[in-house]
């Protein structure tokens, strides 16, 4: 559970913790007992001091929990957590447009559709539900552990609102009146929206990263459970806009000196979302599986030419009755991999979360474990766009009497702008003389009026 985020100038911090339960066998041989504990954690990352506070998006992944006995009255409980965090601050990119340009100056303008990360924030909300075990489930005597996994199934931008909905999967493990272990899963739907800083068009999209901030559950009479949980939908809004820059300039009959520089714009190249299935065979047999959990870890990234290779670690933890009916616990590691096409100047953010319900198929000699993770990747880069920042225009020179008024040449591999600039013409004059709407085929012969 993430309890808080902090932005402190040149670093960001996350305060979080793990609620853990230890199921143990007492020395007197009586039925298994359970103790619970809260393991607080804090994490910090150094960042450049931007002078302004921004927004933090984070995602914590519980990788494993284990316990060992220190004495007859003490246990040591350890949890391993992976945390991914990104810090966003607003920035500006200024484009220059020449003003009061003489009529004979030709400007080469180009428009780029660019996708930006426009706005980040989060929407906190509560779940307060009373749940009832169905009659088909074993009766509940004592809760042993529970977990809540929110998953967003639909997300969109509607004007000045980000709207999202999904399900929170509540998993409980409990002891029955007969002393056996029982488990059950509830699906709790949610639907939320949050106000945005501005109104967006139909191309805008939103990515929601849900997280749990608090949780408590109280059993009541007749098998009912009262769940109170705090959740937060962290969001990032992406929008595509046209950016127009002047890339070049010239005059057909006088010298023009062009000053240029590159304007760098942080742009999103591609976003992907996919499900990855994990399967592992554990070398032990079981008569019945009481509980199984799958914990995906933070993906490890390794840069390769034109791609990013992702190593996907995970661990299964299983509580089962062996072939002699004795309650046992074990774990099994899983390793997956995948690659994402990526240019050398690009970077990638990877968000990973558990999806669905892990399963176990018990056998006499082995047990097959299955889980699933949801992997969201966002590739981005600083796009450098050439831009004219100033013009120095010379005096008009007298026309050369020997200069032809018309040139005939093959289009070749050059565009109309390059041809017009070389030949002392204009793009519009060439298009009109050849009845063109766009760029010509390389083999086409062009009539080029010389101005």
Image (cartoon, rainbow, N blue to C red):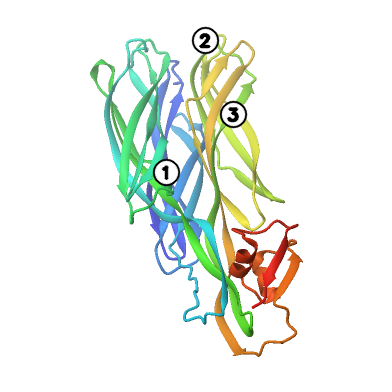
Q: Position of residue 184 (x, y in %)?
A: 40, 20
Circle 2: element type: loop
Q: Which mark is residue 208?
A: 1
Say which of 401 and 249 sits in front: 401
Pointer 2: residues within 10 angstroms few (<14), some, or many (20+)?
few
* Residue 378 seen by the camera: no
Task: State which mark lies toward you, 2 or 3.
Answer: 3
Q: Position of residue 229 (x, y in %)?
A: 31, 36
Are dots 2 and 3 in contact, CB under 8 Å?
no
* Residue 257 seen by the camera: yes
C-alpha gap between disc 3 and disc 1: 24 Å
Q: Is residue 170 above or below residue 80?
A: above
C-alpha gap between disc 1 and disc 2: 44 Å
Quick one: quadrant of the C terminus? bottom right
Is residue 117 left or right of 200 when viewed as pictured?
right
Q: Residue at x 52, y 17 (%)?
A: 320
| Residue under label 2 | 325
**In the image, farthest residue toward the left:** 221
Closer to the N terminus: mark 2 or mark 3? Answer: 3
Q: Is residue 139 above or below residue 434?
A: above
Q: Residue at x 41, y 56 (%)?
A: 55
| Residue under label 3 | 278
Indicate the quadrant where residue 212 lies: top left
Closer to the N terminus: mark 3 or mark 1? Answer: 1
Say which of 271 and 410 sits in front: 410
Circle 3: element type: strand
C-alpha gap between disc 2 and disc 3: 28 Å
Q: Residue at x 35, y 12 (%)?
A: 177
Are dots 1 and 2 in contact, CB under 8 Å?
no
Quick one: quadrant of the N terminus? top left
Closer to the N terminus: mark 1 or mark 2? Answer: 1
Q: Position of residue 386 (x, y in %)?
A: 60, 69
């Amino acid at each position: 559970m993430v309890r808080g985020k902090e932005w402190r100038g040149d670093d960001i911090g996350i305060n979080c913790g793990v609620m853990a339960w230890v199921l143990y066998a007492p020395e007197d041989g009586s039925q298994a007992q359970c103790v619970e504990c809260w393991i607080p954690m804090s994490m910090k990352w150094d960042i450049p001091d931007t002078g302004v506070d921004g927004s933090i998006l984070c995602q914590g992944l519980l990788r494993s929990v284990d316990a060992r006995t220190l004495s007859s009255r003490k246990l040591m409980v350890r949890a391993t957590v992976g945390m991914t965090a990104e810090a966003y601050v607003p920035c500006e990119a200024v484009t220059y447009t020449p003003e009061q340009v003489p009529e004979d100056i030709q400007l080469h303008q180009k428009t780029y559709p660019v996708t930006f990360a426009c706005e980040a924030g989060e929407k906190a909300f509560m779940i307060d539900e009373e749940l009832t075990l169905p009659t088909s489930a074993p009766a509940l005597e004592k809760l042993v552990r529970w977990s809540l996994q929110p998953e967003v199934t639909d997300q969109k931008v509607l004007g000045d609102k980000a709207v999202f909905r999904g399900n929170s999967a509540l998993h409980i493990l409990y002891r029955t009146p007969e002393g056996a272990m029982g488990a059950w899963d509830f699906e709790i739907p949610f639907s939320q929206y949050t106000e945005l800083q501005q109104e967006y068009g139909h191309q805008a999209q939103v990515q929601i990263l849900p997280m749990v901030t608090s949780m408590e559950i109280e059993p009541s009479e007749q098998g009912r459970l009262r769940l109170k949980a705090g959740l937060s939908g962290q969001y990032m809004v992406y929008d595509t806009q046209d950016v127009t820059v002047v890339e070049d300039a010239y005059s057909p009959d006088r010298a023009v000196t062009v000053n240029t520089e590159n304007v760098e714009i942080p742009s999103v190249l591609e976003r992907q979302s996919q499900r990855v299935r994990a399967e592992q065979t554990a070398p032990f047999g079981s008569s019945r599986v009481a509980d199984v959990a799958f914990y995906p870890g933070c993906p490890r990234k390794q840069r390769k030419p034109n791609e990013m290779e992702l190593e996907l670690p995970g661990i299964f933890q299983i509580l089962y009755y062996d072939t002699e009916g004795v309650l046992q616990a074990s774990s099994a590691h899983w390793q997956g991999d995948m690659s994402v096409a990526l240019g050398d100047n690009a970077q990638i953010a990877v968000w990973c979360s558990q999806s669905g319900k892990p399963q176990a198929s018990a056998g006499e000699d082995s047990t097959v474990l299955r889980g699933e993770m949801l992997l969201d990747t966002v590739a981005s880069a600083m796009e450098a766009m050439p831009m004219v920042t100033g013009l120095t225009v010379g005096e008009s020179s007298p026309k050369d009497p020997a200069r032809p008024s018309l040139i005939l040449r093959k289009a070749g591999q050059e565009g109309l702008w390059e041809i017009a600039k070389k030949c002392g013409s204009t793009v519009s004059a060439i298009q009109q003389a050849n009845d063109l709407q766009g760029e010509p085929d390389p083999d086409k012969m062009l009539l080029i009026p010389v101005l």
